[in-house]
Image (spheres, grey):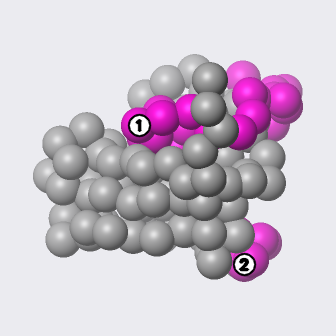
Amino acid sequence: MSNPSSVSGSCFCGSVRFEVDLPTLFCGHCHCSMCRRSNGAAFVTWFAVPYGQFRLLRSATLVRHRSSEEGSRSFCGNCGSPLFCESSRHPEYIDITLASMEGSIDRAPTAHLFYDCR
């Protein structure tokens, strides 16, 4: 398998498209209640890159929801796909849902976050 220097991603309908440059900072499964509720899943797998390695290519239907005092979550307003999480707790990088990627990133998930909340 080749190791590309960038990977594309999108929402389910393709209205929001983006690209990230590798390497990533981390990849892990989050079990917090906000992730579970906003994704309708038992956990969400996130990875992160510094903002300088993230490019939003098409965003006409991107909607941001302020989900807490510290951050916001972004999703496609057309198909509802959860895409990004941004937080003042880590202003130097953006969290991206692994499920929105169209190819492999450079690492497998290595952590379970807020596992005690599951």
Identify the amino acid type marked 1.
Glu
Q: Kindly report the distance in space between the C-alpha atoms of the residues bearing marks 2 and 1.
A: 25 Å
Q: Residue at x 63, y 77 (%)?
A: 52
The range drawn in magenta is 89-118
Residue 81 appears in the rendering: yes
Q: Are marks 2 and 1 in contact (CB under 8 Å)?
A: no
Q: Badge 2: few (under 14), some or many (20 or more) residues near its Cα, within 10 Å? A: few
Residue 37 appears in the rendering: no
- Residue underneath mark 2: 91
- Determine which of the numbered discs, if any, sits on residue 8 in the image: none
Q: Residue at x 25, y 38 (%)?
A: 12
Quadrant for residue 74, please give it: bottom left
Q: Position of residue 63 (x, y in %)?
A: 30, 66
Q: Position of residue 11 (x, y in %)?
A: 30, 46
| Quarter of the image that includes the N terminus | top right
Quadrant for residue 49, please give it: bottom right
Of helix, strand and loop, which one carries label 1? loop
Q: Residue at x 31, y 57 (%)?
A: 17
Which residue occupies the foreground of this view, 46 or 34? 46
Q: Position of residue 117 (x, y in %)?
A: 76, 30
- Residue underneath mark 1: 102
Query: Looking at the image, is mark 2 or mark 1 earlier in the sequence?
Result: 2
